[in-house]
Amino acid sequence: IYQKSDKQFFRFSVSYSNVRILNTVPNVLEYLPNSPKLLILAKYGCKLGNNFSAGLELKYTSRTLPDNYKILSVIGDSWARRVDRGIFEIPRSIKPFLLANLTLKYYFDDKNYMTLYIYNLFNEKYYYPISLINSRPIYSYPGFRRSIYLGINYTF
């Protein structure tokens, strides 16, 4: 966290993983499934006057590879055999996405405030991976569309 002053801050974090699984059945588990290689989070917040603050958060998630369905073929799974025959679609990678979230706060006094939070500000369409072993043939599910939350914190 970089605190420029008592009225501004900037937070930035990066997570990178290029894990490979060794000593497995050839061409079956050569990567860590359902985990993006790169996650980037950046957040900027500022206080505007005595009663108002705003924050903008950006979150980037890189392409994600789903479970390799071939591991299911090795254990004799009938769904995986049908994928090999072309009956079911081969699970594809999950596309990268960028989400923007906005937080606005209005302070009535030191202890009482109202918050407006907008998740997925630009209504980005994105997906999260899900384990094939538990959910085949589904390998991803849609993320949340734009959501708006209004909260009031009142202390008495």
Image (cartoon, rainbow, N blue to C red):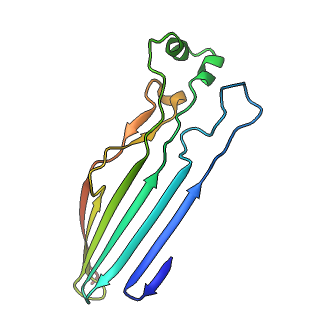
Direction from residue 18 to residue 22 in the image, left or right: right
Q: From this viewpoint, which residue is outermost toward the top? A: 85
124 lies above or below 46? above
Residue 140 quadrant? top left
Evaluate whether residue 79 shows in this view.
Answer: yes
Q: Residue at x 26, y 51 (%)?
A: 123
Q: Residue at x 44, y 12 (%)?
A: 87
Direction from residue 111 to residue 78 in the image, left or right: right
Q: From this viewpoint, which residue is outermost toward the right? A: 23
42 lies above or below 10? above
Q: Residue 73's spot in the image, x, y percent? A: 61, 17
Q: Residue 132's spot in the image, x, y percent? A: 51, 29
Q: How many marks?
A: 0
Residue 76 quadrant? top right
Direction from residue 25 to residue 15 in the image, left or right: left
Q: Residue at x 43, y 40 (%)?
A: 95
Evaluate whether residue 75 shows in this view.
Answer: no
Q: Residue 45's spot in the image, x, y percent? A: 37, 76
Q: Residue at x 29, y 81 (%)?
A: 155
Where is the C terminus found, in terms of image quarters?
bottom left
Q: Nearer the viewer, residue 10 or 144?
A: 10
Q: Residue 18's spot in the image, x, y percent? A: 64, 47
Residue 101 quadrant? bottom left
